[in-house]
Image (spheres, rainbow, N blue to C red):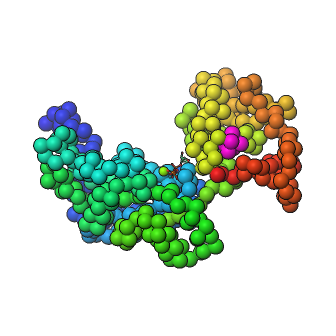
Amino acid sequence: MADKLHKMTDWDRLKFMMEESTLDDKSKEVDETKLLDYLYTRIRGQDEIIKDVAKLVRLSWKKKERTKPICSLLLLGPTGTGKTELAKALTEFLFENEKDMIRFDCSELASGEMSKARLTGASSGYKGAETGGQLTRPIFANPKRLILFDEIEKAHPQVFDLLLQLLGDGRLTEQSTGKTADYTQCIVVLTSNAIAEEVAKVTAGMTDYLEILNAIKMLLAENKIFRPEILGRIDKVYQFKPLEGMIIAEIAIMKIERLAKEFGLEVNFVAPQILMQALLANAKISKFGIRELERILFDLFAPSLAELRDNKAKSASFDVDPSGKIIIKEMEIRKFEPHKQKEKPQAIARPDIDVKGLTKPEEPEKAPEADAGGGGTDARGTPGWPGSMPKPPKAG
Ligand SMILES: Nc1ncnc2c1ncn2[C@@H]1O[C@H](COP(=O)(O)OP(=O)(O)OP(=O)(O)O)[C@@H](O)[C@H]1O
Ligand SMILES: [Mg+2]
């Protein structure tokens, strides 16, 4: 019989669901410190937000009885600052895997009836009724999920009506089948970068959370972005900060480490000149945020990482020689190749990458103003060269 079950269904998933369903209450112990540590490995420069989110998740999941989702968050702020990344990281840590996130791009939910049919299924008899709704059907299969509505301000008012019901009652009825989906084991995240600049201006200098929240709510109401009753049902509103230069450098290091790990390698050192090359390239092409950074780092590092992997290296250092060429050093050789362990670290020069211009800072064409630290800001808003120490650019 067990063999048959193995063949006929997803055994592991069934086992997981049965074990979970034996719990008769909806509470779960969330280790706040572990969650915070994990979020910190994914999101930088938003420390107060991730701290508060970790605490909120622990406390709200402790409740035994719930008639609403575990918690609902509205993440506001400029593009490319970590809003979607936070939703992904929460899903990965709190649920089984990233696939347990249901994600909607609300720019695709701008028409009323069609969006409603997409989310909760077409009425019976209509085309597509049998497939059910994209917001309801996955919940029948697994009720423990994170639901993300990106760019929520673009959703049609009918979508907001559904959202009101979901946030308020924790349930929605599928139009085609009449079955009810239960959202009391879900986390709901709404993101928006609408009026990011206005919010930043109005809340500049404010430190009290309630004062900030009030100012944001007033702005959202004035701009008719959300109906007040929606705001009233959201547990927490967070305003993401624009990413500053050194934070972007930190994120770049984090992304290099992650990329190297994908190649089975550890990175011990990256020369600042190489980091600067990546950050300047990012600042040139992505005016806002760090969307392009991952691709730039891949172009810059992947060929060497692949080469090191072929050489069975375990870790690497990325340095520059006096002529400005990137030098890649293998730091360790895998144990199962003892003959190679005696070899000195091997340096590979990458002739296709030349950071010569970065080894000696160039004079800015026109210094816009005197800067105590020796740095200035050019027309694009990127900092000029501050003498001996290069300074990373600002995002946006
Ligand atoms: N604070 C951050 N820490 C670490 N990585 C970040 C941060 N912000 C953005 N990133 C990285 O930049 C990319 C885009 O970030 P994300 O999708 O979270 O932006 P967003 O705030 O949702 O922007 P948008 O409003 O345009 O949707 C992701 O690859 C993410 O890893
Ligand atoms: Mg996003």
Q: Is residue 164 above or below residue 87?
A: below
Please, is residue 269 above or below residue 88 in the view?
above
Q: Which residue range is magenta in the image?
A: 278-284
Res 283 → quadrant: top right
Q: Is residue 223 left or right of residue 245?
A: left
Magenta residue check for 281: yes
User: Quarter of the image holding residue 273?
Assistant: top right
Q: Is residue 118 visible?
A: yes
Horizontal relation, residue 129 to residue 57: left or right: left
Percent position of residue 391, x then y = 77, 50
Where 285 falls versus 349 (above or below)? below
Q: Nearer the viewer, residue 133 or 117?
A: 117
Quadrant where the N terminus sits is top left
**In the image shown, does 373 or 48 lie closer to the viewer?**
373
Asked whether the viewer can see residue 137, the reply is no
What residue is at 45 percent from the left and 57 percent from the top?
191
Which of 53 and 179 lies nearest the eye of the viewer? 179
Q: Residue at x 40, y 48 (%)?
A: 107
In the image, what residue occupies the spot 51% across and 56% down?
A: 193
Q: Residue at x 67, y 24 (%)?
A: 340
Q: Quick check: 346 above or below 26?
A: above
Residue 387: in magenta span: no
